[in-house]
Image (spheres, rainbow, N blue to C red):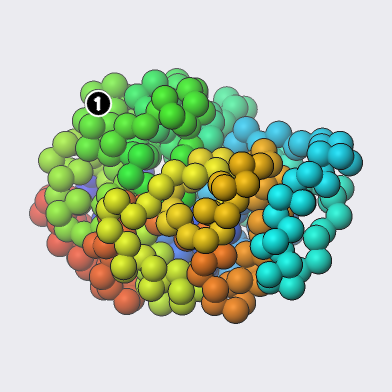
Amino acid sequence: MNDLTGLVGVDVPIVLGPFGGMSSVALTARVSGLGGLGSFGLYGYSADRIRATVGALREATPRPFAVNLWLGVTEPEPTAEEWERHVEALRPLLEEMGVTPPPMPERFLPTFEEQWEAVLDTAPHVVSFVFGVPSVAAVEEAHRRGIVVIGTATTVDEAVALHDGGVDAVVASGFESAGHRGSFLRPVPESLVGTFALVPQMVDAVPIPVIAAGAVADRRGVAAAFALGAHGVQAGTAFLATQESAVAPGHRRAIAGTPAHGTVLTRAMSGRFARGVPNRAVRSIEERDAIAPFPIQNWLTAHFRAEAARRNEPELLSLWMGQAAALARHEHAHEVFAELVAGLPPERVSPSE
């Protein structure tokens, strides 16, 4: 048993990537039940929804699981003129899906404070963060309630900042990873470090467990990560492609057919840089060159994305996936998990496995 498995109470150091807006109780519970650490992304969740979700996870599995929160989100205050301009830029896609352009909401997201209170109340085994360093008070309160705290870093400097902030482990998120880039000390274009350059430098820089994320989709990626000193691996796209995930069927099919050069970093769908397929929605938005700031863009595109998911129209979805998407070849979570376990050094697997 290594530092990470002992820290979070799992059998093997395999972590499910948290999918903000695309998590499912079924997949999270399945990975935890198999002996890894299932994760559930709480982006945009109200306090009541967080409490209900953690309750559902506890009913689905007695094993440890993690929930994930975003830091550093500022509630925007666009003027009426700015709002109309943002809506107008997306009007063709909204109308294509038969969605009436929405009025400006009272707020775009729940506050971190209300989300954090709900997380503390429900006390999951682990809470992970992206886009920043949680406050010392937040970390201390989590520890007081027996909650393990994991941070996410895209550079060595970010990992050092997280360690100095008191987190228990850090995810080394390489630029190959799917979804949003969690950079917070420097702009994303200045923080694009590959997983297998980032991991050994981070291991040398901080004395806490380092979890490799990005381009880890099969046993080869796992073996490489541990050869470079990682204490665990986090896999996202490989699990996103399984039947247990919450994505639309068209999204699953797109993952299997996307080569390493087939993804891009784009702000089109959310207003923040994220890695995914440049489908028709992405191309249309980028061509208009009128992308609203986050979270306004994300809130607006969600209106046509929801209908596109219902109709299974992948060209109008956020097709988040990493550069190793073509290696995601399994239909079910247990198959992905077994493939990843096959890459672990023997001493990293508990006797129960």
In this rendering, would 189 be left or right of 297?
Answer: left
Instruction: Judge whether 350 appears above or below 233 on screen.
Output: below
Could you tell me which quadrant the C terminus lies in?
A: bottom left
Q: Secondary structure at mark 1?
A: helix
Q: Residue furthest left?
A: 346
In this rendering, would 222 be left or right of 178?
Answer: left
Instruction: Judge whether 300 appears above or below 198 on screen.
Output: below
Measuring from the top left, give residue 79's x and y in whole percent. Answer: 86, 36
Report if residue 248 is visible in the image: yes
Task: Name the residue located 53 percent from the left edge and 54 percent from the top edge.
Answer: 282
Measuring from the top left, give residue 201's x and y in whole percent. Answer: 24, 26
Measuring from the top left, give residue 216's x and y in whole percent. Answer: 26, 52
In this rendering, would 319 be left or right of 87?
Answer: left
Task: Name the residue located 38 percent from the left edge and 73 percent from the top edge.
Answer: 253
Task: Name the residue located 45 percent from the left edge and 55 percent from the top edge.
Answer: 278
The number of discs equals 1
How busy is the neighbourhood of tag 1: few (under 14 within 10 Å), some, or many (20 plus)? some
In this rendering, would 168 be left or right of 112?
Answer: left
Decide which of 336, 30 is in the foreground and name it.
Answer: 336
Decide which of 261, 40 is in the foreground and name it.
Answer: 261
Residue type for callout 1: Gln
Task: Name the residue located 73 percent from the left edge and 67 percent from the top edge.
Answer: 95
Q: Which residue is mark 1?
A: 201
Report if residue 129 is visible in the image: no
Q: Residue furthest front?
A: 287
Decide which of 269, 119 is in the foreground and name it.
Answer: 269
Measuring from the top left, give residue 233's x and y in whole percent. Answer: 29, 48
